[in-house]
Each structure stands twice: as C-alpha cells, then as structure tokens.
Amino acid sequence: MSDCIFCKIAAGEIPAAFVGETGEFVAFKDINPVAPVHLLVIPRRHVTSIDGIEELGEGTAGRLLSFTVAMARAAGIAESGYRVITNAGPDAGQEVAHMHWHILGGRRLKGLG
C-alpha cells in the first residue's frame, strides 16, 4: 500500500532500526518505546490488522509467531519474560493500519494479569 508508513519501512523507503528480517517479516525498534525493549514486528505484505491474518496465506501466521518469539529471544528478554500485543482497529488503539505486534520487555510489566 503506497501510503502506509509500515509498508515504506519494510521496503526500506523510511529508515528504521531493524533488529531482524526475513523475506516475509521485519522487526524494528519502536520510536516511542514504553519499555526498555519495545520492538515492532510486521509482515512485509500489507494486511490491515490481525483480523485479516488469513490474507497472509497458509502457514504464514505460524511463521510470524515463530519470528516474533525469535526476536524476543534475540533481544535477550525471553528468560525474564516479555509481552506480545497486537491491536485490531481504532477502538482497540491501533494507530497504524498495518498489522503489527509489539514486543515489550526488559523490566517487570504491570497489568493485564
């Protein structure tokens, strides 16, 4: 999608601090972190939110989950624990209409049980 900031980041048109990438996914540091480690994981292919995950195709959702876990491990937060969050739509707080996962860690996180 030509006007999507995350599509532009995935294509290398907008700089971002990449911490990992494959042919299908990109992980980069959030520019407004809310935890010591705050990464974003996105598919290179434009999908608006998790509600449209089937648009990625068969097997891709599992690879996305595995990539997300690999990025948390690479960031060194797997042993102490981390949170993975995605939002679907404006009422959930989704600010960029491109499916993305937040990986948060590096300190004790509060809330959400």
Image: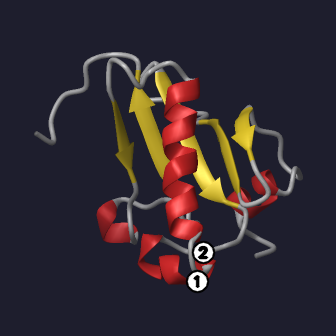
Q: Position of residue 14 (x, y in %)?
A: 83, 48
* Side (left or right) of 46 relative to 41: right
- Crowdedness of circle 2 by 10 Å Cα count: few (<14), some, many (20+)? many
Q: Which of marks 2 and 1 is in front?
A: 1
The quadrant where residue 23 appears: bottom right
The quadrant where residue 3 appears: bottom right
User: Does 21 sit above or below residue 99?
Assistant: above
User: Residue at (42%, 78%) from the top-left corner?
Assistant: 51
User: Does 15 sit above or below residue 1?
Assistant: above
Residue 55, numbered circle: 1
Could one spot residue 79 in this view of the protein? yes
User: Residue at (40%, 56%) from the top-left corner?
Assistant: 86
Q: Where is residue 47 in the image (x, y as percent from the top left)?
A: 60, 75
* Side (left or right) of 39 relative to 92: right
User: Residue at (52%, 45%) from the top-left corner?
Assistant: 68
Q: Where is residue 62 in the image (x, y as percent from the top left)?
A: 50, 63
Q: Are marks 2 and 1 in contact (CB under 8 Å)?
A: yes
The quarter of the image holding the N terminus is: bottom right
Identify the amino acid type marked 1.
Answer: Glu
Q: Which residue lies furthest to the left in this view?
A: 113
User: Residue at (18%, 28%) from the top-left corner?
Assistant: 110
Q: Mark 2 points at which residue?
A: 47
Q: Find numbered disc 1 in the image and state the secondary structure of the residue it sits on.
A: helix
* Side (left or right) of 68 relative to 91: right
User: Does 32 sit above or below residue 11?
Assistant: above
Out of 71 and 18, give the one closest to the viewer.
Answer: 71
The quarter of the image holding the C terminus is: top left
Identify the amino acid type marked 2.
Answer: Val
Q: Which residue lies furthest to the right in this view?
A: 13
Alpha-carbon span between mark 2 and mark 1 = 7 Å
Residue 97, numbered circle: none
